[in-house]
Amino acid sequence: MRFDVLTLFPEMFPGYLGQSLLKKAIDRNLVDVHVHNIRDWATGLHRQVDDRPFGGGPGMVLKVEPVVESVRAVCRKDTRQARVVLLTPRGRRFDQPYVERLSGSDRVVLVCGRYEGFDQRIIDILEPAELSIGDYVLNGGEVAAMVVIDAVIRLLPGVLGDEQSSVDDSFSSGNRLLECAQYTRPREYRGYSVPDVLLSGDHQAIAQWRKEQSFRRTRQRRADLLGHTAVNKEHIDESGTDEASRKG
Ligand code: 6GU
């Protein structure tokens, strides 16, 4: 899979891409990430990439020519059809189903916004998907682009050591529960102990405990995730001792 990132701040990426799972995935040629500076496509003496909004108002707007020309040029660098994604707080919310959708593409071109936004003609001409990573405002789309790359790469075959681990992730299809508490050694630290059940060796009891933990935590923190009747039903059936889950 190939990612291209278009940004005014390409220096933000190598540090992040050079670490951990991302570095391994890139080193093993499972994914290719190319970062480009939109300014390279800006013309004129000052290579201006932004300008004041027509009609007045605060802030600056990304200009149509450098963005459209850079996206077009980058798309031509590879024969595979690219999905073009604009990162903007006005976009649709990025979620795990969308991560799954993107992970099925060969090529994604991510365009990072800055300033007050994009000239509307960029959107009219390129007809990109517009994505936001949540209901808050960032200074630019760069961190959001890293979020998208990170989330998508996790799903590519061969990237995670254990293929099951992304299937079990909270929010993946078929799992709409937050993860349960996890423990590792030591068994006790400053009077805080590991729950006995995890040391019992009883795999069925452990699985049951984890499921109940997940369900309880999800109900407390993210009851919105339990709107899915399939998940509700499964836990009503299997965690019969949990009063609130019996009520559904
Ligand atoms: Cl994609 N960009 C910016 N600037 N702010 C955001 C965002 C994106 N997603 C949430 N907030």
Image (cartoon, rainbow, N blue to C red):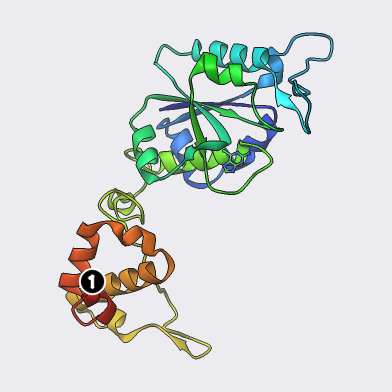
As drawn, 117 above or below 185: above
On the image, which quarter does residue 9 sit in? Answer: top right
State the image coordinates of residue 74 (x, y, percent, origin top left): 54, 15
Question: Quarter holding the C terminus?
Answer: bottom left
Does the image show residue 178? no
| In this picture, residue 88 sits left or right of residue 184 | right
On the image, which quarter does residue 30 sit in? Answer: top left
Residue drawn at x 32%, y 53% is: 165
Residue sitting nearer the eye, 228 or 21: 228
Residue beneath disc 1 = 207
Does the image show residue 160? yes
Name the residue at the bottom extreme: 191
| In this picture, residue 194 sits left or right of residue 62 | left
State the image coordinates of residue 211 (x, y, percent, origin top left): 27, 70
Some atom of ligand 1 lies within 8 Å of the CB belonging to the residue at label 1: no
> Can you tell me which quadrant of the image ligand 1 is in?
top right
Badge 1: residue crowd in 10 Å (few <14, some 14–19, many ≥20): few
State the image coordinates of residue 215 (x, y, percent, origin top left): 31, 69
